[in-house]
Amino acid sequence: MNVFGVDIGGSGIKGAPVDLERGDLAEPRHKVLTPHPATPDDVAGCVAEVVANFGWSGPVGVTFPGVVTGSTIRTAANVDKSWVGIDAGKLLSDRLGGLPVTVLNDADAAGVAEMTFGAGRGRKGTVILLTLGTGIGSALFVDGRLVPNTELGHLELKGHDAEKRASTKAKEDEDLSWEHWATKRLQRYLDHVEMLFSPELFIIGGGVSRKADKFLPLLEDLKAEIVPAELENNAGIVGAAMAAAAR
Ligand code: BGC
């Protein structure tokens, strides 16, 4: 069965029909640039453009980079604040001519896809996927079951919002070397998350997972196993489609 997945990110809004048996895109994805400011109306217009590009009519799953309860947006750390309080499921469904829309947090979507088709396949116990990008997203699983909206990117680290110190955006903005970023920023962040949750496995997602060989070998003394995500850029789209199919 195919279901459509859309991933709303800070730089691009991308989507494709997803083959749910294979956990992969059924067709090459279509991407439009995220408008700035990323207001609800403008982003909804982009989502509609992506879906229309495939002439899709059926269920649609959509990721959002903030807390989502039901289909209502509760936080918007890196997108326009006017999203907070909006029923994104209704907004998007209206823009898509009444197609059923399921909305979930972006990291939760990526995590669900990785646990089924990627690095977390078959893993029991506590597993934490962290997406390192503009922000830090988290997905916490206990015996394969998601605890949604954990927002571990906003833990406090040395008096700062952790994602402001340990995201890849912090690395770029402060022009940090791989070594400095990995050993001083990411290491401290992971130590803190490990102290709180004692996971068996960390899965590192986000675009930087493609460069895992540059920083994972620099990390020391973690008790948890730590591996890069396997679905890379498509994890959000696949997870969004899985969430829509599950509803
Ligand atoms: C948001 C999370 C999101 C993460 C990655 C954070 O700033 O609060 O909800 O998952 O960025 O986009």
Image (cartoon, rainbow, N blue to C red):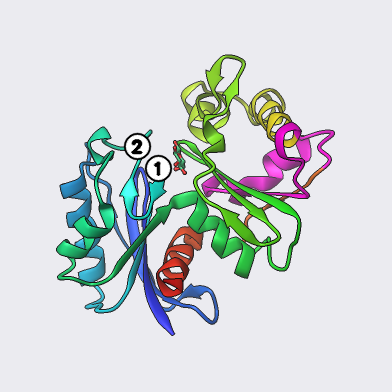
Q: Is residue 224 visible?
A: yes
- The image shows residue 155, relative to residue 204, as above or below, that is above
Quadrant field for ligand 1: top left
Q: Does residue 96 appear to the left or right of 156 in the view shown?
A: left
Could you tell me which residue is drawn at 80 percent across and 44 percent down?
A: 224
> In terms of image quadrants, where is residue 130?
top right
Q: Mark 2 = which residue?
A: 76
Relative image position of residue 49 (x, y in whole percent): 20, 63
Q: Residues within 10 Å of mark 2 (few under 14, many from 20)?
A: some
Could you tell me which secondary element the residue under label 2 belongs to? loop
The region drawn magenta spans 195-223
Relative image position of residue 214 (x, y in whole percent): 68, 41
Q: Residue furthest front?
A: 70
Disc number at residue 66?
1
Could you tell me which residue is drawn at 25 percent across and 77 percent down?
A: 56
Could you tell me which secondary element the residue under label 1 belongs to? loop
Q: Is mark 1 within 8 Å of ligand 1?
A: yes
Q: Quadrant of the N terminus?
A: bottom left
Disc number at residue 241?
none
Q: Residue furthest top?
A: 159
Residue 13 belongs to the span the image colors magenta: no
Q: What amino acid is labelled 2 in the image?
A: Ala
- The image shows residue 135, relative to residue 90, as above or below, that is above
Task: Give how far apart the Cα atoms at labels 2 and 1 are.
Answer: 5 Å
Q: What amino acid is labelled 1 in the image?
A: Gly
Q: Does residue 58 appear to the left or right of 118 in the view shown?
A: left
Could you tell me which residue is drawn at 41 percent across and 81 percent down?
A: 2
Relative image position of residue 179 (x, y in whole percent): 69, 28
Q: Is mark 2 within 8 Å of ligand 1?
A: yes
Q: Is residue 231 visible?
A: no
Q: Does residue 26 appear to the left or right of 153 in the view shown?
A: left
Q: Are marks 2 and 1 in contact (CB under 8 Å)?
A: yes
